[in-house]
Amino acid sequence: MRRPLVAGNWKMNGDSKSTVNLVNGIANGRAEVINAEVLICPPYILIPRAADTLNGRDDVFLGAQDLDINESGAFTGQISASMLVDAGCKYVLVGHSERRALYGESDQDVAAKFDAAQKGALIPVLCVGETLAERESGDTETVVARQLQAIIDLVGAEKLADSVIAYEPVWAIGTGVTASPEQAQDVHKFIRDMLAVLSTDLAENMQILYGGSMNPGNASALIGMQDIDGGLIGGASLQAESFLAICKSAN
Ligand code: PEP
């Protein structure tokens, strides 16, 4: 039985004070979230502040938004998996569309990060999804399959078992436009069917999250779909109230 996971991607937002407030707000409302696992991904520099605020409680997981593929050394400005684990992280996002589009990360770069995350004992949350132009030209499945195949080619299908997949149509991220539950379900099913060819257990157990303008008003309908196992939330994860409302919609 798959447990829903609701993950907040804070992106480049917040400071020490807002982090303490937001983490306390989420922690205070956590008991009302019955079903979902809860994950927050603050900016690197705020992760220790979030960890201190959580003060050892393990019902709100910590994650990062990116990592470097190297373990240590002369890589100015970069952060490794072991540093993230040391700071209290359990998860890390890889291949977010903003990393792909703004920082030129290729499918192979993302696969290398996926591999580095797992080798460093982090659970990668692999983001996949098509642009508007790709959807309009009927290439959604081709793009998603290509992004997933790059991971399989590098690490092997069995390693996917220790990861989470987030389907995030790029045209829905930060735009206020959400994929309809049916549109999202179609792609989630496509991903699960692709995994089923590799292993029925893998397909059955994989948490596949939806991301793209999910909010308290649309979360229940999306998470209610058969192959949608939670959400990766951007804007609505910056307020405890809206983030918790989304978490509770999986109750
Ligand atoms: C995201 O960036 O992962 C995301 C889903 O953002 P938003 O919820 O703001 O669309």
Image (spheres, rainbow, N blue to C red):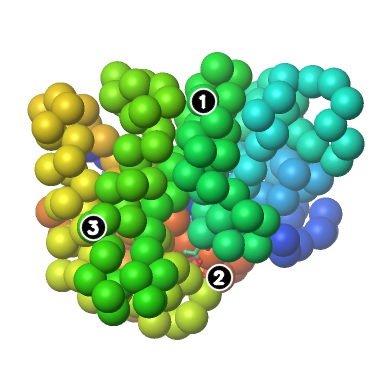
What residue would you read off at disc 3? 141
Q: Compared with residue 75, is residue 95 higher up or lower down, i.e. above or below?
A: below
Q: Disc 1 marks which residue?
A: 115
Which residue is label 2 attached to?
235
Question: In the rendered image, which quarter is residue 135 located in?
Answer: bottom left
Name the residue rendered at 83%, 54% in the picture: 16
Q: Which residue type carries mark 3?
A: Glu
Q: Amino acid at mark 1?
A: Asp
Residue for point 84% across, 31% down: 75
| Residue at mark 3 to residue at mark 1: CA–CA distance | 23 Å
**Where residue 93 sits: x, y (%)?**
54, 44
> Quick check: marks 3 and 1 in contact, CB under 8 Å?
no
Give the answer, above or below, for where 165 lies relative to 189.
above
| Circle number at residue 32 | none
**In front: label 2 or label 3:** 3
* Numbered-mark total: 3
Q: Secondary structure at mark 1?
A: helix
Q: Nearer the viewer, mark 2 or mark 1?
A: 1
Residue 26 appears in view: no
Q: In the image, residue 213 lies at what x, y percent?
A: 43, 73
Q: Is residue 64 above or below residue 119?
A: below
Residue 251 image offset from top left, x and y in percent = 26, 53
| First in residue order: circle 2 vs circle 1 | 1
| Residue at left offset 72%, top offset 50% | 43
Q: Residue furthest bottom?
A: 176
Q: Marks 2 and 1, how far apart in space?
A: 28 Å
The crowding category of the residue bearing disc 2, from other C-alpha atoms within 10 Å (few below 14, some 14 to 19, many at least 20), is: many
Asked if residue 85 is positioned above or below residue 196 in the image, the reply reads above
